[in-house]
Amino acid sequence: MKTALTIAGSDCSGGAGIQADIKTMITNGVYAMSAITALTAQNTTGVTAIMESTPEFLGEQLESIFTDIYPDAVKIGMVSSSSLIKTISDKLKKYDAKNIVVDPVMVATSGAKLISDEAVSTLKEHLFPLATVLTPNIPEAEVLSEMKISNEEEMIKAAEIISEKYGCAVLCKGGHQINDANDLLFKDGTYTWYNGKRINNPNTHGTGCTLSSAIAANLAKGFDLDASVKRAKDYISGALAAMLDLGKGSGPMNHAFDIQSKFTKENSEAEQ
Ligand SMILES: Nc1ncnc2c1ncn2[C@@H]1O[C@H](COP(=O)(O)OP(=O)(O)OP(=O)(O)O)[C@@H](O)[C@H]1O
Ligand SMILES: Cc1ncc(COP(=O)(O)O)c(N)n1
């Protein structure tokens, strides 16, 4: 069985972070492992507390993983401080990690800031150059390209700037309303659109985490980047279209939409 590792923060409410990543990796057919960068106390309405891992403890987690079950792909999500980012880049280099998907998580859907300003420059210097693909949303792509994005041409330009600056592919995600949930992959000087149909679902907590983990899982299985993005896009569309509605704020998606039918009959029997 192929294996994937998520290096990210825990979301105790289960919709984003490590929890979303593990659900996504399992349902995309790989064995999932996790190295936790921080514990968050959060739910669908917001983040109330963050407790970071120490760099030493994060380093120990990564040593345990890489010296035993080598990951075929690595996804990196919320990493809030420079020392944690440096620990990750040191270990990825030490173990020659492959298929690295970096989701530059900066702000949660609920509005909470998940990274310090100093850490953004450390991400750029130490982690982005190791990435196979970066997956910024539009606000993150604006920060990284230092330009405003208000149409598709500007999305292409921003992705090109980021790709050239860091020498990796860039998937600029269009979930933030510019178009119909169309994402742009800029790679090797050219671009491809991955068109999605906007699903009228207000519950989008964890979409970024889920998409990047689905890409990592498919890279782990041996698909190339284009095929992995296409498969990840199909997966997230299915998870959103399942219209799960939990919590008081922007709720989580149904990561298990594909296997849920197996349980539908017994769940409804149990409810009666
Ligand atoms: N309403 C929607 N319908 C269909 N696809 C969507 C919708 N919202 C987001 N997506 C898709 O979800 C993926 C994540 O995009 P988005 O821009 O929301 O990322 P993000 O902002 O990093 O996510 P997060 O909300 O987790 O921070 C993209 O493939 C995007 O096109
Ligand atoms: C631990 C953790 N990692 C990432 C996110 C971003 O996800 P979203 O923007 O969908 O809330 C989050 N809320 N929590």
Image (cartoon, rainbow, N blue to C red):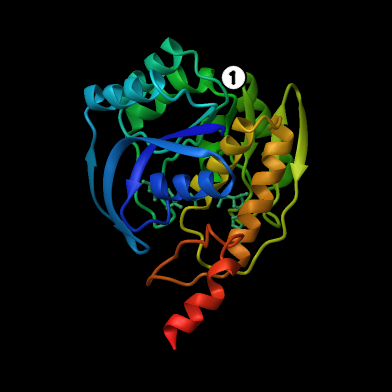
Q: Quadrant of the C terminus?
A: bottom left
Q: Quadrant of residue 34?
A: top left
Question: Where is residue 47 drawn, in percent x and y?
Answer: 30, 54
Which is nearer the eye, 271 or 160?
271
Horizontal side of residue 226 vs 89, given as left or right: right
Dot 1 surroundings within 10 Å: few (below 14), some, or many (20 or more)? some
Question: Where is residue 251 drawn, in percent x and y?
Answer: 44, 65
* Secondary structure under the numbered disc 1 in the rendered image: helix
Question: Where is residue 125 drawn, in percent x and y?
Answer: 45, 17
- The residue singled out by tag 1 in the image is 165
Which is nearer the eye, 186 or 30?
30
Horizontal side of residue 179 vs 56, given as left or right: right
Q: Is mark 1 within 8 Å of ligand 1?
A: no
Residue at the outermost bottom position? 272
| Amino acid identity at mark 1 | Lys
Q: Quadrant of the N terminus?
A: top right
Horizontal side of residue 191 vs 135, given as left or right: right
Residue at the outermost top position? 94
Q: Is residue 229 above or below residue 207?
A: above
Question: Where is residue 114 drawn, in percent x and y?
Answer: 35, 42
Count of numbered badges drawn on the protein:
1
Q: Quadrant of residue 221?
A: top right
Q: Residue at x 42, y 51 (%)?
A: 16
Horizontal side of residue 208 vs 117, given as left or right: right
Which is nearer the eye, 167 or 158?
167
